[in-house]
Image: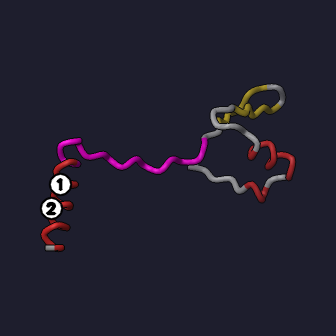
């Protein structure tokens, strides 16, 4: 993957690139011909934690409760 540092660009171009909304496209044109297209992405979402099945979750809660009671008495 190629990388372009916005600090190396003129301020007007850097502002245009930073202002793109997720999913918005920017066409790169040279002498009237399209030479490229950039599509903005939003910030990466953190990976979702896989949830426990309801039975496993209930079993875990009950075991924690039972262990707490046994430790108390």
- Residue 15 in percent (x, y) is at 81, 47
SS of the residue under disc 2: helix
Q: Number of marks in the image? A: 2
Q: Nearer the viewer, residue 18 or 71?
A: 71
Q: Residues within 10 Å of mark 1 (few under 14, many from 20)?
A: few
- Residue 69 in percent (x, y) is at 17, 66
Q: Nearer the viewer, residue 31 or 6?
A: 6
Residue positioned 20% across, 61% down in the render:
64
Q: Which mark is residue 9?
A: none
Q: Nearer the viewer, residue 24 or 27?
A: 24
Name the magenta segment's main secondary structure.
loop
- Residue 51 in percent (x, y) is at 30, 45
Which part of the image, by quadrant, shows the C terminus?
Answer: bottom left
Residue positioned 76% across, 42% down in the render:
19
SS of the residue under disc 1: helix
Residue positioned 68% across, 53% down in the render:
4
- Residue 35 in percent (x, y) is at 71, 32
Identify whether 9 is placed above or below 68. Answer: above
The answer to if 72 sits in the magenta stretch is no
Q: Residues within 10 Å of mark 2 (few under 14, many from 20)?
A: few
Q: Which residue corresponds to mark 1?
A: 62
Q: Marks 2 and 1, Cα distance to the nearest angstrom? A: 6 Å
The answer to if 47 sits in the magenta stretch is yes
Left/right placement of residue 37 relative to residue 73 reads right
Tell me if label 2 and label 1 are in contact, CB under 8 Å: yes
Residue positioned 22% across, 54% down in the render:
61
Span highlighted in magenta in the image: 42-57
Q: Which residue corresponds to mark 2?
A: 66
Q: Quadrant of residue 17?
A: top right
What colour scheme has been applied to the protein in the rendered image?
Answer: secondary structure
Left/right placement of residue 18 relative to residue 50 reads right
């Amino acid at each position: 993957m190629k990388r372009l540092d916005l600090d190396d660009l003129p301020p007007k171009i850097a502002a245009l690139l930073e202002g793109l909304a997720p999913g918005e496209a920017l066409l790169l044109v040279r002498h009237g011909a399209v030479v490229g297209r950039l599509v903005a992405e939003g910030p990466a979402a953190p990976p979702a934690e896989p949830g426990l099945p309801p039975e496993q979750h209930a079993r875990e809660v009950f075991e924690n409760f039972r262990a707490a009671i046994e430790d108390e008495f």
